[in-house]
Image (tube, coloured by chain):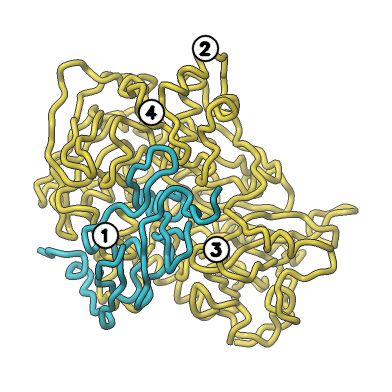
């Protein structure tokens, strides 16, 4: 019986690469979304809400709920479940609307 | 594969899942020029979501039911002249003032407006013009809130399935699957096959209710067989299915540590004193699917209420909506699964071809498609009735349970809007509380808010008209300025003049004119 999803489908992925989450290294596989790479590292939350400051991550998994918004390479409000991970990506926890620098 | 100057296209298909793929390839095989737009980099939609090629899955079918039906469509697409436009997020469909197939003076071509890129943040907006449009936008999951559902580790059942199918990842090691609907069994058996422990599947309805629809069951034996396959997989993995029960609370501070499962009465009211704690590190939850129809309702298409409280597009016997020239297939007409979606996509394509090419459709083919479609639709309607949420579910909400995830609006504030301020529909609740006003445009909380506002007495009101089906940067709107300005930025760009270019763009960020 398969012990991992990759074993179940007989995955032979290209070489893994490194991204970072809040500065910590995370290993991603080519073809994974940012959210999938984070789940793969056991990370389930990468945003705090605007009102309560509470942690959120991927929920609907198909780009509909916008709960998985993350700051990717400095750009906030990217849907992590849709955006493919690329070598060297710096993912940071998005706080609130992600544009604190604008002072709004 | 060079194309002749096919802009405007005969047919623009929105969505490359089962319905859209079937419609696009059938239309192309009948001689139509077809553009196929989809948000994803790959075809297949949600049901046939698969890992990206670079993940090198040798056996993608291990996570799928009826995979060969998809590979057959994919093969036909590759052989066809269909122009596949991946990474295209359609935000609006409008009617222009040129000659279309609507008939009569003033009827024009359709314009399909899209933003591009993996998440729609690409630089280049696109407009595709076509004589007919087939909406095959599928469905999204219905959610009903409960205390703790905002904790990281609580994910949509379909979301867990999607992340597993495309990213080969799991939300946890011990995943409870809960909610209602046939999707739960499929999700639980996939998760278990992929190595997760599934401590319980928690279904709010009872499967025995299917016995009330003997005719729909008897004429759709493939559906019973599909349930048996999932049932056998669950037995093999020793997964326990608890019916007439719900997760009524999630425990944990920063992430899921356990859930409380409570027995429900016939109306889904929790039965006091029956709560049982189950340890887990993730919960996959969903209460059926909601047809994704906002592009159509924005155009004024008629809808019909379904017995599970959702709304689908009202279609004629040949898949056309109430707006002439606009067809729909698959879950947009009521959730019925991939096989029904393929049939409807093909039937729509046959009808579009007859209209656009001005020659009669093959009568035998149409009759056979309609016969099979009607049989499967009967099963879909039975399924919606079996898993319709009971009126008592709001009893498991506490005043501080968030109902709207985007705007963080609690059940207490929504009750206040209803009981103290007199709101009687979701729109009034939204205006008073901001519930449904956030990023997701009410997709996650809409069903729950409507149910609370009408106190479960009536079906949801017709969908609100919202001008944008997906977030659109101001720059894309600015590009609309002036009727003469083409939306594609390059001269002779693909949205205006696809002739002489390759038919398939290579990646989510690739513009259709690359190549």
B435, above or below B420, in the image: below
Identify the element where label 1 is drawn: helix
Chain under disc 2: B
Q: Nearer the viewer, mark 2 or mark 3?
A: 2
Query: What is the drawing colour of chain A?
Result: cyan
Mark 1, residues whose alpha carbon is within 10 Å: few (<14), some, or many (≥20)?
Answer: many
| Label 4 to label 2: alpha-carbon separation | 26 Å
| Label 4 to label 1: alpha-carbon separation | 31 Å
Identify the element where label 4 is drawn: loop
Badges 1 and 2: C-beta atoms under 8 Å apart? no
The residue singled out by tag 1 in the image is A39
Q: Are marks 2 and 3 on the same chain?
A: yes
B341, above or below B267, in the image: below
The residue singled out by tag 4 in the image is B389
The residue singled out by tag 3 in the image is B120
Q: Nearer the viewer, residue B57 or A81?
A: A81
Chain under disc 4: B
Q: Quadrant of the N terminus of chain B?
A: bottom right
Label located before the other in sequence (4 or 2):
4
Mark 3, residues whose alpha carbon is within 10 Å: few (<14), some, or many (≥20)?
Answer: many
């Amino acid at each position: 019986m398969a012990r991992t999803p990759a074993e179940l489908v007989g995955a032979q992925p290209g070489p893994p690469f490194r991204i970072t989450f809040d500065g910590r290294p995370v290993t991603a596989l080519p073809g994974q979304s940012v959210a999938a790479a984070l789940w793969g590292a056991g990370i389930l939350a990468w945003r705090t809400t605007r009102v309560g400051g509470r942690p959120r991550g991927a929920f609907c998994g198909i780009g509909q709920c916008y709960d998985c918004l993350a700051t990717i390479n400095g750009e906030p409000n990217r849907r992590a479940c849709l955006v493919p991970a690329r070598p060297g990506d710096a993912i940071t926890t998005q706080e609130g609307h992600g544009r604190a620098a604008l002072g709004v | 594969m060079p194309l002749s100057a096919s802009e405007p296209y005969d047919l623009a298909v929105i969505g490359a899942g089962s319905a859209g793929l079937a419609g696009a390839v059938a239309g192309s095989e009948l001689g139509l020029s077809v553009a196929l737009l989809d948000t994803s980099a790959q075809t297949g939609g949600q049901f046939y979501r698969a890992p990206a090629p670079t993940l090198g899955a040798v056996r993608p079918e291990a996570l799928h039911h009826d995979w060969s039906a998809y590979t057959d469509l994919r093969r036909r697409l590759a052989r066809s002249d269909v122009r596949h436009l991946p990474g295209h997020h359609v935000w609006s469909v409008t009617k222009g003032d040129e000659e279309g197939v609507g008939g009569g003076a003033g009827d024009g071509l359709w314009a399909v407006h899209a933003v591009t890129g993996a998440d729609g943040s690409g630089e280049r907006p696109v407009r595709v013009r076509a004589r007919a449009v087939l909406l095959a936008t599928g469905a999204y999951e219905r959610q009903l809130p409960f205390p703790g559902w905002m904790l990281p580790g609580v994910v949509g059942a379909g979301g867990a399935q999607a992340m597993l199918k495309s990213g080969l990842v799991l939300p946890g090691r011990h995943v409870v699957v809960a909610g209602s609907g046939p999707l739960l069994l499929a999700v639980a058996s996939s998760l278990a096959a992929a190595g997760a422990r599934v401590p319980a599947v928690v279904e709010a309805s009872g499967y025995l209710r299917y016995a009330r629809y003997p005719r729909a069951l008897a004429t759709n034996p493939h559906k019973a067989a599909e349930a048996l396959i999932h049932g056998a997989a669950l037995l093999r993995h020793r997964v326990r299915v608890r019916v007439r029960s719900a997760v009524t609370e999630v425990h944990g501070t920063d992430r899921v540590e356990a859930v409380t499962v409570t027995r429900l009465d016939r109306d889904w009211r929790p039965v006091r004193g029956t709560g049982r704690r189950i340890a887990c590190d993730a919960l996959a939850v969903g209460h059926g699917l909601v047809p994704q129809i906002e592009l159509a309702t924005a155009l004024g298409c008629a809808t019909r209420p379904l017995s599970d409280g959702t709304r689908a597009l009202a279609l004629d016997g040949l898949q056309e909506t109430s707006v002439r020239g606009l067809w729909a297939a698959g879950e947009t007409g009521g959730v019925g699964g991939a096989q029904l979606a393929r049939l409807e996509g093909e039937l729509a394509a046959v009808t579009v071809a007859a209209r656009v090419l001005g020659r009669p459709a093959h009568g035998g083919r149409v009759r056979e498609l309609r016969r099979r479609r009607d049989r499967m639709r009967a099963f879909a309607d039975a399924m919606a009735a079996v898993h319709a949420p009971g009126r008592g579910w709001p009893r498991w909400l506490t005043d501080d349970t968030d109902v709207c995830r985007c705007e963080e609006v609690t059940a207490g504030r929504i009750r206040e809007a209803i009981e103290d301020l007199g709101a009687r529909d979701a729109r009034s609740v939204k205006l008073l509380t901001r519930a449904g006003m956030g990023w997701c445009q009410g997709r996650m909380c809409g069903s729950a808010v409507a149910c609370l506002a009408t106190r479960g007495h009536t079906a949801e009101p017709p969908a609100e008209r919202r001008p944008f089906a997906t977030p659109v940067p101001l720059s894309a709107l600015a590009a609309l300025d002036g009727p003469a300005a083409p939306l594609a930025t390059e001269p002779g760009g693909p949205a205006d003049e696809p002739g002489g270019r390759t038919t398939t763009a290579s990646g989510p960020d690739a513009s259709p004119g690359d190549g």
